[in-house]
Amino acid sequence: MELTVACIVQLLNEADEETFAVLERSLEADGRKGVRRAVAQARRRLDRQAAERARLDGLYAFERELAGRPDAVVVGLDEAGRGPLAGPLAVGAVVLGQERIEGLNDSKQVKEADRSRLAQAVREKALACHVEFVEPAVIDEVGMARALRLAFSRALAAVEAGGVAADVVLVDGNPLHIDPREVNVVKGDARCAAIAAASIVAKVARDALMVEYDKEYPGYGFAQNKGYGSAGHLRAIDELGLTPIHRASFCTRIEQPSLF
């Protein structure tokens, strides 16, 4: 009895690589357009899954290579919110466990709808996880370079205060010289698992805070622009002035006085 196209489509949609190989061979002589289309779609799905597994394998393998030995305790550090006109700088610090986190990637490459899920997975599966904030007033006082070092140092200290002794400290970007164990990785959020995890938790925590600030300071669009200098945000500054969460040193070209 010949299987219906609908039945074959369901089998192909549920097939793993091994099962697909068997089905593909058995369907070679089936010329129905719906079947040929379903076979091609299943092949593309499995190719995408294989590519994603390889990408994730690379994140973890590169991190182990940098660590130098398989049992090394690695802390990944990354920031979110370096460039906005308003809101704090956030730095995430993460020590991953043995359990892999599917979909882990640089936060900029993750769809917004998936970030919260991944951040929750990181918090549940990581051996340690912390997000450190540096407020706008501190950024104005000390400058971004010192604020970055301050946030990274505090985030690392918070993780180790929880009982995790790091062997290697992986930092995204250029050298910060915050710790003798520091290893800097350019574009590390797309290359190292722990740095990618840190980028996600920092981004999600900061975005959530900006949504709360949107309620406290309505009219600036913080829930949407997250403090970045969008056209609407700039218009709001021109009309309403600066708030206490604005980085005044970032807004020197905007001459409106603070109204708060």
Image (spheres, rainbow, N blue to C red):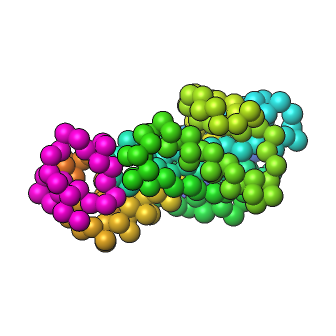
Q: What is the residue that sits farthest to the front in this orientation?
A: 141
Q: Quadrant of residue 132?
A: bottom right
Extent of the magenta region: 235-260
101 up-or-down from 121: above or below: above
Q: Position of residue 64 (x, y in %)?
A: 78, 35
Which residue shows up at 76% across the image and 42% down it? 74
Magenta segment: does it hold 203?
no
Magenta segment: does it hold 256?
yes
Q: Is residue 33 left or right of residue 249?
A: right
221 up-or-down from 66: above or below: below
Determine if residue 124 is in view. yes
Q: Position of residue 137 (x, y in %)?
A: 39, 53
Q: Is residue 210 left or right of residue 171?
A: left
Main secondary structure type of the part rendered in magenta = loop
Q: Position of residue 202 (x, y in %)?
A: 53, 53
177 up-or-down from 227: above or below: above
Q: Quadrant of residue 189?
A: top right
